[in-house]
Amino acid sequence: MSLPDVLLEPLVRAALAEDLGRAGDITTQACVPAAALARAAFVGRTPGVIAGLDLARIAFQLVDPALRFTPLLADGSRVAPGQTIATIEGPARGVLTGERVALNFMGHLSGVATVTRGIVDAIAHTRCRLACTRKTTPGLRALEKYAVRCGGGINHRFGLDDAILIKDNHIALAGGIAPALRRAREAAGHLVKIEIEVDSLAQLEEVLAIGADAVLLDNMNPDQLRAAVRLVAGRAITEASGRITPETAPAMAESGVDMISAGWITHSAPVLDIGLDI
Amino acid sequence: MSLPDVLLEPLVRAALAEDLGRAGDITTQACVPAAALARAAFVGRTPGVIAGLDLARIAFQLVDPALRFTPLLADGSRVAPGQTIATIEGPARGVLTGERVALNFMGHLSGVATVTRGIVDAIAHTRCRLACTRKTTPGLRALEKYAVRCGGGINHRFGLDDAILIKDNHIALAGGIAPALRRAREAAGHLVKIEIEVDSLAQLEEVLAIGADAVLLDNMNPDQLRAAVRLVAGRAITEASGRITPETAPAMAESGVDMISAGWITHSAPVLDIGLDI
Amino acid sequence: MSLPDVLLEPLVRAALAEDLGRAGDITTQACVPAAALARAAFVGRTPGVIAGLDLARIAFQLVDPALRFTPLLADGSRVAPGQTIATIEGPARGVLTGERVALNFMGHLSGVATVTRGIVDAIAHTRCRLACTRKTTPGLRALEKYAVRCGGGINHRFGLDDAILIKDNHIALAGGIAPALRRAREAAGHLVKIEIEVDSLAQLEEVLAIGADAVLLDNMNPDQLRAAVRLVAGRAITEASGRITPETAPAMAESGVDMISAGWITHSAPVLDIGLDI
Amino acid sequence: MSLPDVLLEPLVRAALAEDLGRAGDITTQACVPAAALARAAFVGRTPGVIAGLDLARIAFQLVDPALRFTPLLADGSRVAPGQTIATIEGPARGVLTGERVALNFMGHLSGVATVTRGIVDAIAHTRCRLACTRKTTPGLRALEKYAVRCGGGINHRFGLDDAILIKDNHIALAGGIAPALRRAREAAGHLVKIEIEVDSLAQLEEVLAIGADAVLLDNMNPDQLRAAVRLVAGRAITEASGRITPETAPAMAESGVDMISAGWITHSAPVLDIGLDI
Amino acid sequence: MSLPDVLLEPLVRAALAEDLGRAGDITTQACVPAAALARAAFVGRTPGVIAGLDLARIAFQLVDPALRFTPLLADGSRVAPGQTIATIEGPARGVLTGERVALNFMGHLSGVATVTRGIVDAIAHTRCRLACTRKTTPGLRALEKYAVRCGGGINHRFGLDDAILIKDNHIALAGGIAPALRRAREAAGHLVKIEIEVDSLAQLEEVLAIGADAVLLDNMNPDQLRAAVRLVAGRAITEASGRITPETAPAMAESGVDMISAGWITHSAPVLDIGLDI
Amino acid sequence: MSLPDVLLEPLVRAALAEDLGRAGDITTQACVPAAALARAAFVGRTPGVIAGLDLARIAFQLVDPALRFTPLLADGSRVAPGQTIATIEGPARGVLTGERVALNFMGHLSGVATVTRGIVDAIAHTRCRLACTRKTTPGLRALEKYAVRCGGGINHRFGLDDAILIKDNHIALAGGIAPALRRAREAAGHLVKIEIEVDSLAQLEEVLAIGADAVLLDNMNPDQLRAAVRLVAGRAITEASGRITPETAPAMAESGVDMISAGWITHSAPVLDIGLDI
């Protein structure tokens, strides 16, 4: 489930460059003797799900190859308050210099994993799954999508290029559902799925008559969703979107849709509070 | 107050590359005629403060130079629900292809500006200011710091290199407050300020005896802060940190500290809900 | 069908940097007066299909914004020997300096489009389509995939990440077809299709019993393909691969498979011979 | 003869990023257990000359440092069908994930080396050498030039900056052979050679009267070449170009020219068929 | 005091790419057997101060990980003619290929450290310190600032963003000293110092009435500086600039200013003559 | 003679990023009204030769496209004290923000051009030319080589890859002059020249017996050089190196060598003093 280091390393280098600036960690260089050693533990402060351990490891490796980062949990694990997530030991300067970048990555991704898990748990009694969207933090999409997987969610499109998702504006500019679907089918490779957004059962019927891999049922309430699922009758994947929270999710999931999707789990998840105790 | 395009452009290019992937916007290419024109408005859905208009402008410019982006508000302005923030017009394909990247930047930065403004307003009756920290989203620090300024806040350090901030671990590894401060002063250039974290009035007295530009009063309650401010008596800038929310901020600010700082305004601000109406 | 400039420009910059080296075009600088103007035509020398006009345009723009590049054909058009594809006019130095990079891009991509079209035409009497693979020239995958589309082909996966393709080695390491397909289904997002390679009808039956979006019928002859198509009976997309040439393609396509795929149309296509006549 | 890793690594990173996309190798992650080990052999399928082993090694190193890549042949060696070129062993996931990038580099460069060797062998009874040109695949020039050396060829200019090559258009725009050569000589550093293209013996005489390091005899037949070589009489290096194939090369080489050059050995060489047997 | 490798490595990679070009070290590849080993010593030819050992180490590491670089001195040490600074041993090809890049970095930075130390020594009898400016070689600012520290100097601003320095043009465009200082104070974060340039005692009085962290006394002679220091009376840091040389520095430093600054120590320092003896 | 913008732009972007840091020009943003306009002149303070105008132009373009940069001199021109080199006008903020980067490039390159011109003038009565070396500032080689051309000099190798230069260490490791030259000739392409360093007339005779394009006469005095030139008798280009200054150059040039080369004109040239008068 993890991402290869070769994709992660450039992001960690950029984050370190951003933090080290043009003179490096001047506080640590001034105050901490070069020979000092330290051992520190990443500890959860609030309950959550961990994601981003590889990024923390790479950050410390790049700061000082003499540092040893030891994860005690794996990405996707739940962490309890006070529980140690990983340890870092070696030259004290490196521990202090790499700390913030490591925490910024882990906190953000664990935050995404944690809110994802919250909804996934809330709908665990159904067969409905939770997906993220393209509403991600610029530059971090691959990481946030990964964190969603750590939280038990699934990924929607990674970009504009890996699936066709026909929205209301596309339909309007294409001249209707039929021409939009027809053009999409002509253009798509055989491994590219086609999903289309509908606002009403009437639109849905029009789509089903032509065929699509998935339908995005936008801003429908559970009753409407139930009717839509009945209408689809297994002929397409059904996705519901709009105002998904841990509170609203169960009712929507119980409508029988295959999946619900939410942008806020990636773009508005608060960080998971993780501390570094030296 | 704005950031130069030459710094913003690489970030927008990276975000577009991330979204366009290896085949570009296949939905729009398939469904929308090349000759179709569109005019759309960025509209606020909830009240907030705008930040990131330049990034939206650059995104559309890079997608299609024929697009015309017209801001109706400036970064730092408040927006009301339903109010138009900016318009974009030109080839419809470009509008649809650039929309998500533009919204991802604007939503995130406006979210940061909005929560910042919330606290700034809450403490406006005092002379205390609000600062952000180095707890930022990896890769986006310059943008988030800028968004804090748009929200009326001020910036703390941009990185490890532009100011000295001596924390508890530095003190411990340096062998105490006195050696830490002495070493820091020797190493610092004349334009580099020195701030030091203290947990108690005893530590504060030790710092004041030696001298520092600023003191970080960590996790103190308003009464402790008041005592600390009295003790400092103008000899250093006073900064309070720890659990700052719109609710807790007024009492802390009324203690007389020069500034309060909060990490969550950058790393955990929910996006501001902005829509694009075509 | 075209790729956005923002994706193409970095590739053209790299190609120009590679050709200009550390001193630029020393021949042209020495021999050609700065004020000299030139007008030149890109002319086809052999019949083919054009791809890559945008790259040529960008190359000249980057060399000298005063140059005017005017395409007379569009990507995907057929060109006859002697036919003018595009013209370039302006400062003679820029024309000569940009010529080779422009031709290297256009020649290579038009070569890919041309061999693609050759097979596409050969199977035009069937409903079978031609797809490319991940056997592409390192660094140029997006361009070569685009050129395949210009030649009338369709694209298979763009990378390891946008579809699941279970090959013989995956099956062996997963412990058989059933566990491989089951694991793939659990891991895949709802827009990710699953294709699996089979070598025999026995394997194919096993796959169909479980279900997959597509089956890759590897190295089967037309008779075997026909049997496989019959067996599949529309329950999955059928793809045939192995030694596809303009000569072998018709018989394979006539077997009824949905698509045939070939690596050599991207990695071994000879360039289309295009000249620049000044 | 090999290129330093520091030049190769960025190209391999780019190729891996292109293939791994935004989610990595989802098939292998899903289907292959993390603990599985594999041992595989790169085996030649058709006779040829190997080039690019370093790129394969770097690809696997970057995918997983635990992989061990062992070359059994060296770049420049001939390979027979069925012969093992190199082995790779270690975590099975890494073997499968890195396979395609390694093969794409090796296949392409070995293809260039193979066609080069074909012509070099065909003219081995003469003292004539084979050179490549600037007609290379964008972004891969250094690699393709290296592959030409692996095949026994020599390199012409690496770019527009490392030698002066005056072509017909330069002559026309400079106002003739004499002013072109004079300007070139004034501009050139002492280590920069000057070569000039001629179409006829008359032009050749004009060049020889002034002097040049090399003459490019464009599109001459063997008889014309023989006359040109006689005329030059050792006063310049003689290069013949135009329609060089294994069939035409011997007659051209026997004319006595110092070298023949061909663009297609870099831009149109089909890949060498290499397989990975697990 | 050292800079982290993660900041240095990209600069060394760029320098190696610049020197290795598109074919690598063709002389060494041709002339030196692959198995040859070498041991060489970096030896000072003239007295000076060393800076840049880490860059030399990284250069050799990147050229060939089998090379062993052993520093005998540390950055900031003085070196005497004939003294060995560091040794490099391992494959001879790597030693010769990496030599020039290593020397170019070390020579340049040691040159900066040496001229810095010359002035620092000349003013060592005062409490005045020497600072560098933003007049640095493009792309090498962080390194040159580091070399200044190696020579005993201190750093002024690293860029336009980490301190406010109000110069004559800013004053004129702001409408005077008072509005300039007022605006600066409003905009500055609490850790950003404000310095302002003054040409006369009258301007200085105006500044002191408002307050600033530092004053830049531009082009004043020692008598004027003495008067200025008297006037400031400890209320601001005093910096003198303009025509600082080892000869003029003592008189300026004896005026009582806190620091003197010079651009030429970074942008015009001749390299320190260091040789590599094999 | 100029370098194409496409090569210069990345260097200017890097220099601007280095100077603008993470917050941009905070002084100018704070103090200078957005609407203020300015007109400024680049004026020579000391006599010299100009180089780098294109870099200044690009710097201002990137800071603000509304700025208009007008060169009054061309690169390679002499400038007298007080003479205007170029003007810049437009938004005052942009003028002040771009000023330092523009001056850092122009000052450095004009410094290189000026010291080059000093020696070139000193040897103008001979037919000897002045060349630079690979002893350049890391990252700026192409620019410094260009500045040498602006000063009337010629360029030696641009890197390790574009010519063969056999030095004493290569000779020793190859087993002598003869094997070194033989190997070099085998490896070299037809446009690659071979130069070899000799310390004595004995070595020179050995070289001439075998043949080389150029000989580097290392650390010989004028009498020795004269003898060497006599011995060579036109059979190779003769280059003298070692301690070349404006004072020593004439005697060395009068020895009859074709060229003299000096590292310090690139790595130790002081900047030319250029000011920006607003």
Image (cartoon, coloured by chain):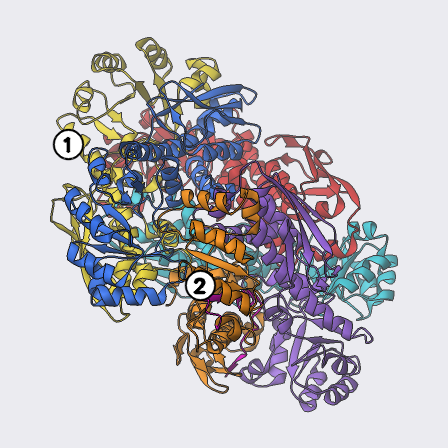
Chain colours: A red, B cyan, C yellow, D blue, E purple, F orange
Q: Which image quarter is the N terminus of chain D in?
A: top left
| Side (left or right) of D111 relative to E225 | left
- Classify mark 1: helix, strand or loop: helix
Mark 1 sits on what residue? C121
Point out residue A76 in the picture as x, y percentages from the top left corner. 59, 31
User: On the image, which quarter does residue E193 sit in?
Assistant: bottom right
Query: Magenta part of the protein: which range?
Result: F254-278
Nearer to us in this view, E275 or D162: E275
Q: Which subunit holds the residue at mark 1?
A: C
| Side (left or right) of F112 relative to D203 | right
Q: CA distance from mark 2 to mark 1?
A: 55 Å
- Classify mark 2: helix, strand or loop: loop
Give the residue at x 20% y 65%. D176
User: On the image, which quarter does residue A83 sit in?
Assistant: top right
Q: Which subunit holds the residue at mark 2?
A: F
The residue type indicated by label 2 comes to: Asn
The residue type indicated by label 1 comes to: Asp
Point out residue D222 in the picture as x, y percentages from the top left corner. 17, 42
Point out residue F251 in the picture as x, y percentages from the top left corner. 52, 74
User: On the image, which quarter does residue F24 sit in?
Assistant: bottom right
Nearer to us in this view, D137 or C69: D137
Judged from this view, the residue extending furthest toward the bottom is E202
Q: Mark 2 or 1, which is nearer the eye?
A: 2
Mark 2 sits on what residue? F155
Instruction: Tell me, yes or no, if residue D130 can be seen here.
Output: yes
Query: Within 10 Å of the Cα at label 1, are there few (<14), some (14-19), or many (20+) other Cα atoms?
Result: some
* Number of marks in picture: 2
Nearer to us in this view, D161 or C259: D161
